[in-house]
Amino acid sequence: MTESATEPFVHPALFYRGEREYLHGTVPFVRDGLKAGEPVAVAVPGPNLAVLKAALGEDVARVRLLDMTEAGRNPGRIIPRVLRAFADAHRQTRVRIIGEPIWAGRSSLEYPACVQHEALINLAFQGREVTVMCPYDVDRLDEQALTDAHATHPVVISGGRERPSAAYAPARMVERYNLPLEQPSAAEEFTFRTGRLPEARHFGVEQAARLGLSGVRLDDVALIVAELTTNSVVHGGGSGTLRVWAEDGHVVCDVRDHGRLDDPLAGRRPPARDKPGGRGLLLVHALADLVRIHTSPEGTAVRCYIRQR
């Protein structure tokens, strides 16, 4: 890879075909970082993680390893809990990370959030001494995913060659995947306002239990509903609507209000230490298995998926 020690944030996409190209692109990236004294982390899906661990040999002991199918199941938690967590722990030096948030097993429901995540990495690390390389499996991902990768990464590595991406436009991609979220007719609904937040939380937990959640997962729903409805009252015009339903093995909690979410990194950056608040959406991302958000001048919808397990 061509990169300068004085260059701040570097964010290439690595297009690969098969195991050989995967290792050809990732192993030297890791070893060059270790040789330069840079902390290195790898967050990729389990099968690729196993292949990379075997190829690194003894060097693997010096690398932070994460299975992205677990750590990054919700794309909204990757920046704060994977990338920022590692980079912020090593602020005195440049760090390099391999992060593979889009793989063939991702659902069409998850994909828009994945693309927004890839685009927002550029904003989240602007000016930071960080390199995040994102592998893309050319053989198993569809053409749309590869096209979008050109728009979310300033540099693309393909066939061993590195080129600037002429399609790079991360802000446009965040807005492109700011998609309206259709509401099912079968959802149970509760309208809340100031003074009715405990009732909204109770309603959410009651419906989630009826739909099969229990134990810790019910506690997660209680926290998610509490944070989202409080945000609506404080920032969304003082009222909102909570809907709960079951969908494809998940309980879904959808909260809508008349506010607009202007900060694209809301819930993806650590809260300021000298200011109260700023932790609600961060907690929601940490608890939910997927968070989809649509915001416009007419209002904001935050939809959380909690697996029925």
Image (spheres, rainbow, N blue to C red):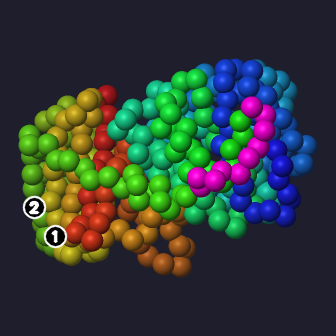
Q: Is residue 225 visible?
A: no
Check contact, mark 2 vs mark 1: CB within 8 A: yes
Verify whether residue 161 appears in magenta.
yes
Q: Secondary structure at mark 1?
A: strand
Residue under numbered circle 1: 239
Drawn side of residue 165 relative to residue 244, left or right: right
Magenta stretch, overall SS: loop
Residue under numbered circle 2: 191
- Give residue 135's position: percent from left, percent from top: 64, 36
Is 70 placed above or below 87 here? above
Q: Secondary structure at mark 2?
A: strand
Q: Which residue lies at the image location 30% right of the left edge and 47% below the top edge?
A: 304
- What amino acid type should be assigned to the residue bearing mark 1? Ser
In the picture, the disc for residue 221 is none
Drawn side of residue 128 relative to residue 189, left or right: right
Q: Nearer the viewer, residue 161 or 30?
A: 161
Which segment did they paint magenta?
159-168
Q: Which residue lies at the image location 54% right of the left edge and 73% below the top edge?
A: 273
